[in-house]
Amino acid sequence: MGKEIFYFLIFPGLLFSGIVGGFLSWFDRKITARVQFRQGPPLLQPLYDFIKLLTKETLIPKKGSQFTFFVAPILALFGAVISAVFILLPLFGIKTGFVGDLIVIIYLLNIPSLSYMIGALASGNPLAAVGASREMKLILSYEVPFLLVLISIILKSGMSIKLSEIIAFQAANGAFIGSVSGVIGFIVILMCIQAKLGLVPFDMAEGEGEICDGITIEFSGTTYALVNLAKYIMLFVLPALVVGLFFAGMNFEGINILWSVLKVVLVVLLVTLIRNTSPRVRIDQAMRFFWIWMNLLAIVSIILAIFGL
Amino acid sequence: MGKRTLVPLGPYHPLLEEPEFFKLYCDGEIVKEVIWETGYNHRGIEKLCQSKTFEQVFYVVERICGICSTSHPFAYANAVESIPDVEIPERAKYIRTIVGELERIHSHLLWVGLAGHFLGYNTVFMWAWKYREPVLDMFEIITGNRNNYAMFTIGGVRRDISPEQATQLLKVLDDVEVKTTMLVGAVMDDPVIHARLKGVGVLTAKDIHDFGAVGPTARASGVDIDVRRDDPYAAYDMVDWKVITASGGDVFAKAEVRLLEMYESISIIKQCLEALKKTEAGDIKVKVKEIPPGIGIGHAEAPRGEVFHFVKSDGGNSPIRHKIRAPSYTNIPTFRRSCVGGTISDATIATAAVDPCYCCTERMSHVFDYTTGKHIMSAAELIKLSQEKTKNLKTKLKV
């Protein structure tokens, strides 16, 4: 039991993934700033933000369900941390996990988005309601291609639904990104994690210029700090999952440690560059994009995977 | 009529640079009706102008709007100078035109950046504003201020442009031209921008006539109006340029008009700088001793459309009536046509597309019921209401 609590709270759970996620968030902001000819924040800015938010007053809207509103960010953080544990343990080779953990991960990765939605709807703010309805539509759009890509991965790894086995298979037979279906699957999953992270062009649930941060508008102080922490962790966990699924996971022997870190940073860099080179799309355009184009690509990836390409 | 939700845009909203309240009545994401409320930053400029001398009014009216802070003095100068019918020196005309067109460049660059920001495309926002910086620096070199230039006066301008400044300005213009071409490429060739802007917030030529919209908003719908050509003032009839129009009427067409207008502005300034060489340096002002009794009307094409000033003089040293109509005053009501039927995302960019300037638009002295014409409140009553409210707040907060 003590070990599990250690996994959850210290490594690779809350503390570790929070710190790494904060660093990646700094990296994302710094790259964004450099692209936009700005100086960018100092390295510890995410920490400062977090501490500052913790010391601020936490406002809870009087209308709506106050208990649900307060619990939602905690739930989001919980979901982010537990998915971090399930993804990072096999990735770091600490524990092999259990058969079918990939399916659990699919569920766990949705908890933060769902929690924001619950919190937004509990706040009773019309802008938050618009944001929540957009988030709901977005989840419906990106989940299907995300699942289809996972199916293609499962096919390629010889019908394995265990993350550690998928990584071990790649370590033995070469990373999936080296194959045609792998490249296509990577493109699809990159778009999906862009939407899961709520970054431009799929940030319509927040839509700063439209609905003033919509889904998170009513969060303040501690609750907003928790929302931010969950976002930091997701910014680490989702690229880490992609590294596990397409880049043969991580290896911590000698010089390989550098290469492992670079893989995660590279995926975050791609995400950052996409978000800086496109405007926000409308929710109906996003749905069409995922349902038609991304599903099509994912199915192509599955067919190619069946033929072993 | 189904159930409608009120989605508020404002009074404080990241979309709006100034306090303004748009009530979007929505059915799901679809906007069914837009109602806008003003009155958050009314400053009583017209009344203020009546307490200043004719010369001082320039510095009041250029503070109406921080962005088009030369178009109001421009229109005011045209109005006041038409009362004694002064002909200003040619050199002053060219300098006025240069300042006016430089302002158009910086205002349009600002709009491109803001439009990018509203679309969530912050890279365009930062880039456009970075390219705008040299233009503002140029303003500082020519007029002494980056904003609120205090350049105009009755009978001419207050500062001359030296040959060194002209060379500097030419260099900056060449640079801006390159950067504009880059921005045009970034906006016109981006498929996602096409998807977001094409067919959004469409205003037909009929809508433009119905609402009396002006400026780039009208020109983007194929209505070929431009005060600079239709009723030339300053040096606009002495240089060669053309009015840019587009036929789409959507947000994309408005962006197109603004981007292409920047090239025209650059060309106008270059011609004016060339013409400056032929006029005598220092001849920038004629002395106007007094403004006789009479009525003066002046207009100017601001970056957002036609600015109209009406000045009435009784022969004293200050106007006895000063009436201002800013372009946003006629452009903002078009939201009722361009936003309705679209989604909330479309409504935000459609409102931004007319480049609204709210504080120019604020006019209020009398509240009445629109349908019945029944008087509700007069200006004095409004002031009394405000004072009472402040008093109540003070007792409540114990200050």
Image: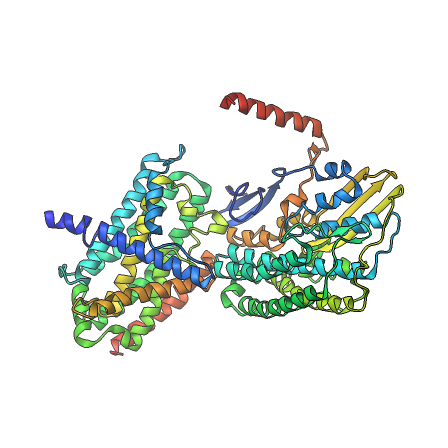
Seen in the picture, residue B52 relative to B154 is either above or below; the reply is above
Q: Is residue B225 visible?
A: no
**How many numbered markers are drawn?**
0
Q: Quadrant of residue B202?
A: bottom right
Nearest the eye: A139 or B320: B320
- Name the quarter where the C terminus of chain A is drawn: bottom left
Residue B239's image quarter?
A: bottom right
- Asked whether, in this view, residue B331 is left or right of residue B185, the answer is right
Between residue B118 and residue B77, name the one nearer to us. Answer: B77
Q: Tell me where residue B134 appears, x and y as whole percent.
A: 59, 61
Residue ID at (16%, 52%): A7
Question: Residue A118 occupies which quadrant of the picture?
Answer: top left
Instruction: Locate residue A230, reporting x and y percent.
Output: 30, 50
Q: Is residue A22 rendered to the left or right of residue B103?
A: left
On screen, residue B388 above or below A154 = above
In the displayed structure image, the side of residue B108 where residue A58 appears, left or right: left
Residue B130 visible in the displayed image: yes
- Counting from the top left corner in percent of width and height, residue B245 is at 69, 64
- Give the x, y percent position of residue A209: 50, 51
Q: Residue at x 84, y 50 (%)?
A: B81
Q: How is the image coloured?
A: rainbow
Relative to B154, residue A277 above or below:
below
